[in-house]
Structures are given as structure tokens and as C-alpha cells.
Amino acid sequence: MLVSLGACVIAQIECEFMNEVSNAEIRNIIFEKNSIKVLNLDFHIETGADKKTTDRNVYTNIYTLHLPSTLNYTDVINHLASYSNIQAVRVTNT
């Protein structure tokens, strides 16, 4: 979902990744560096076949983001997609 509020854009972006550390990396490296505000975060974890370890878990975060006027949502998606831990990234309506 994309909503334009004057010079800023609100976007919902879904990221699926294999390593829970990726969430902190996303927040610190991408969002803070680019002055992106996280308005809401919805997340869930799908456990792997081997319940004794977490290395096969799939983490999914749906971020509601406030993007500055200088940043396009496609730039954010392309930047997220460049990380090896991120398996999928998309704009969502949920």
C-alpha cells in the first residue's frame, strides 16, 4: 500500500529473511541512515522442520514506513533486496 501525504509517502513493505539479526540490520543500516520512520511493525515466525534449532526459521516483517520526500519506495525495495539474508521483499496491502 502506498499513500501520499503531501511531500511524504507511507508504504507497507514486507521482508522475509532467514536470520533474525537482519531485522536490526534493516533498522540500523537502512531505515535510520535514510531517515525512514517505522510507524508500525507486524511480524511472524515460521519454524523450520527441525524444531530443536532456530536456524531454519523464516522471519517475516511487514513494516509501515514513513518515507521522506527525497526517497522513493522502489529505492528502499532495491536496497533491501541487495542483502543476502533477505529472501523476499515486496510492497503489500495488508
Image (cartoon, helix red, strand yellow):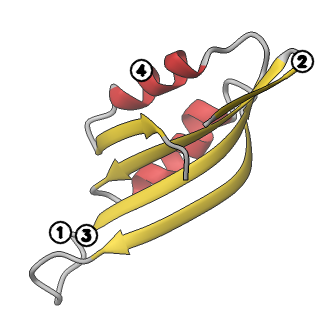
Dot 3: element: loop
Instruction: Give amino acid for label 3.
Output: Asn
Vertical side of 20 occupied by 62: above or below: above
Mark 1, mark 2: which one is toward the viewer?
Answer: 2
- Residue located beneath label 1 in the image: 56
Instruction: Give amino acid for label 4.
Output: Asn
Residue found at x 78% / y 21%: 68
Mark 4, mark 2: which one is toward the viewer?
Answer: 2
Q: Earlier in the sequence, mark 4 or mark 2?
A: 2
What is the residue that sits farthest to the bottom in this orientation?
Answer: 52
Q: Earlier in the sequence, mark 1 or mark 2?
A: 2
Mark 4, mark 1: which one is toward the viewer?
Answer: 4
Q: Quadrant of residue 89?
A: top left
Instruction: Give amino acid for label 2.
Output: Gly
Label 1, label 2: how many angstroms apart (C-alpha)?
42 Å
- Residue located beneath label 4 in the image: 78
Mark 3, mark 2: which one is toward the viewer?
Answer: 2
Residue found at x 46% / y 46%: 14
Instruction: Give amino acid for label 1.
Output: Arg
- Residue located beneath label 3 in the image: 57
* The one of 39 and 11 positioned closer to us in this rendering: 11
Vertical side of 9 occupied by 61: above or below: below
Label 4, label 1: how many angstroms apart (C-alpha)?
25 Å
Q: Is residue 40 left or right of residue 88?
A: right
Residue 35 percent location from the top left of the image: 75, 28
Q: Earlier in the sequence, mark 3 or mark 2?
A: 2
Residue 61 percent location from the top left of the image: 48, 56
Q: Earlier in the sequence, mark 4 or mark 1?
A: 1
Label 1, label 3: how many angstroms apart (C-alpha)?
4 Å
* The one of 92 and 79 positioned closer to us in this rendering: 92
